[in-house]
Image (spheres, rainbow, N blue to C red):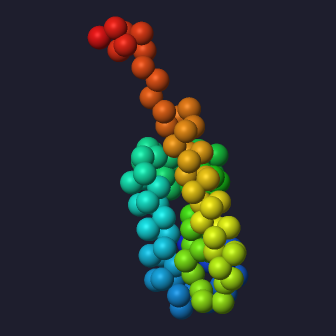
Amino acid sequence: MSLLDDVRTALRVTTTLTDGEIGTYIGTALFDIENKGVKPEFLAEDADADNGDYMPIVKTAVINYCKAQYGRDVEASERNACIASYNSIVASLLNGKQNVHYATDDEVDG
């Protein structure tokens, strides 16, 4: 299943009529995550070697971002919760050992 399909399912959308809008939100979320400093290789569609898909943590972040942006009938508290979850996941990605470069002794000594 594609990321668009996963997001559409999470949004409880059963039609493809709004795929353009949803795709824009997906692209914005992925751009924002990378723009904040997450390494691009973690955002690649084949980053999850087990199934050739996005990593589940990235999917979850994108879904939360899209839930906060999509639709007009969503309560403000739910939108805020989704954005808070998105920001928490992005912070986790940024602080994860795979994204942080630890200086070696040679680099520290110059």
Query: Observer-nearest residue: 12 or 3?
Result: 12
The vertical placement of 66 against 45, above or below, is below
Residue 42, visible in the rendered structure: yes
Quadrant in which the N terminus appears: bottom right
Residue 79 falls in image quadrant: bottom right
For image coordinates 60% across by 66% down, the residue present is: 83
Residue 90 percent coordinates (x, y): 55, 52
The vertical placement of 15 against 26, above or below, is below
Query: Observer-nearest residue: 109 or 22?
Result: 109
For image coordinates 50% across by 46% down, the residue present is: 42
Residue 37 percent coordinates (x, y): 42, 46
For image coordinates 64% across by 46% down, the residue present is: 50
Quadrant in which the C terminus appears: top left
Residue 1, visible in the rendered structure: no
Please, which residue is most extreme toward the left here? Answer: 110
For image coordinates 65% across by 60% down, the residue present is: 85
Query: Observer-nearest residue: 29 or 78?
Result: 78
